[in-house]
Amino acid sequence: MEETRKNGMLVDVDEFPKSWGHAWILAVQHVLAMFVACITVPLIVFSGYTTSTGANLAQLLIAPTIVSAGVGTLFYLFMTKFKSPMFLASSFAYLSPMISAVGIGVTETQTLPNLWLLPIGMVMVGLVYVIVAIVIKFCGVKWLNKLLPPLVIGPVIMVIGLGLAGSAINNLNNTASGSYNLLAIFSGLVAMIVTGVCAHYGKKTLSLIPFVIGMGAGYLFALILTLIGYYGFNNEYFKIVDLSPIVNNFVDASGSFRGFQAFLDYPKFLFIQESQPLSWSGVAQAAMLFVPVSLVTICEHIGDHENMSGVIQKNLLEEPGLDRTLIGDGVATAISGALCGAANTTYGENVAVVGVSKVASTRVIAMACGIAIALGFLSPIMSVVQTIPACICGGVSLVLYGFIASSGVKILMANKIDMGNTKSIFVASTILVAGIGGLAINFAIGKVAFSISSTAVAMILGIIMNLILKDKKEDKPAAPTEAE
């Protein structure tokens, strides 16, 4: 039995559990905590896109996304000298710019997604992180707090979450299949309800992985409908789950057994996928999509590290230092962009795993990285994951995107922002209406077209309004007259 340390941990940052079995269980739990993110992001961003051979691009990029989380976290651990027990996984904050980026230039005749804009965008995000880290190293963090106070960050995060509502509904409706399917919607709603129940009533491990349990329940419901209705009664309407990826994993197009590849295969990384050619116009639009959101996620990064500092009773902003954690996160995002197109970010779920288990060992985190990387090469597991229908992700996304938006509200409440204050109302209103209403700005300089996304425009307008509208000083009570 481990003894409790002064900071409340059973196993501290630089220690290792006495039992290897315990260590493996904890490592697996860290993987499970981020697993849904690594499945959901590619399924949403690349929904409806296929390769020239007809393969589902969203399914192909699940394994690279899982591997990227492990590789990115390992870099972060090295950068922070194994002193910060954080796990990095796919960021939902970048879903909107990612969806917009891959769709740039896509037409009825040009159906290939603009994949190369994703690594370009993530490199830009990494550069912003590194630049901010250098500035913080020499100038501190006050300037960032003034530029992006809670009054601006909260509504911007709300815009990011609510701006994805349409994507969630399209997935729930199974829009990509081309037909409305009520059974698919029911399956997605089962996933949504079970996720909510687990998050609210679950204890210990169950409460840490509600999205895993919810997706599993929705998938099981959809699978039962498929097995009975489609395979049992040959009714096409009941085909919710497509089991062909499992079959194709073991048998090739000619019907022959795939041999060793049926069990171990390399992930189909983004850099080997077909894409539209790059253009200066596309690169300019990518900058407008990704750079503004990076400033918001930097604030989330600081918040997560403050949270973890409180959990382990060590100030991570001082040691290893915010400059190191930002560089670790930013470069990890650039690496992940090249491998799978997604951004890496610190995960609150994994912070919760450390808090509940009271094991802060960075070596356990490194073991989790190894498991994540290995999973990407295990063909049978990846083939099962590839059969998850879009409606299940849509059902979970109803909660997930609302959760993102609600976290923006939480920021306002935690910082006791007075929404009865005229300034607060005007700043928040400007951000919300501009962002959700879709106020994008399009212009051209010469032959290069620029497009500033609605999220970026909303944040810029919020910053401007916040700087223009100064806080009013409370009127001092009038001095009593002699008559009084």
Image (tube, rainbow, N blue to C red):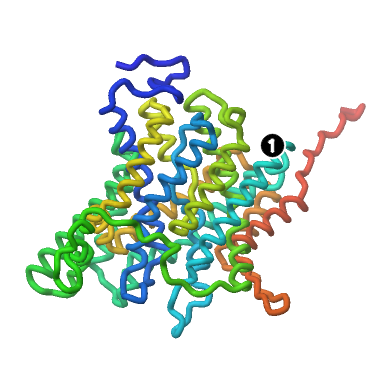
Residue identifier under label 1: 137
> Eyeballing the image, is 25 above or below 272?
above
Residue sitting at the far left = 232
The residue located at (63%, 51%) in the rendering is 128
Query: Does the rendering let one see residue 241?
Result: no
Q: Is there any visible trace of residue 148 in the rendered image?
A: yes
Residue at 31 percent of width and 70 percent of height: 55
Q: Residue at x 36, y 76 (%)?
A: 52
At mark 1, the secondary structure is helix
> Considering the image in quadrants, where does the C terminus appear?
top right
Indicate left or right for 364 with 6 as reference: left
Q: Position of residue 314 (x, y in %)?
A: 53, 24
Q: Is residue 448 above or below residue 171?
A: below
- State the residue lying farthest toward the right: 482
Residue 257 picture location, percent across and down: 15, 64
The 10 Å Cα crowd at callout 1, few under 14, some 14 to 19, many 20 or more, is some
Between 80 and 395, the one lying in front of the other is: 80
User: Percent position (x, y) of residue 40?
Assistant: 37, 56
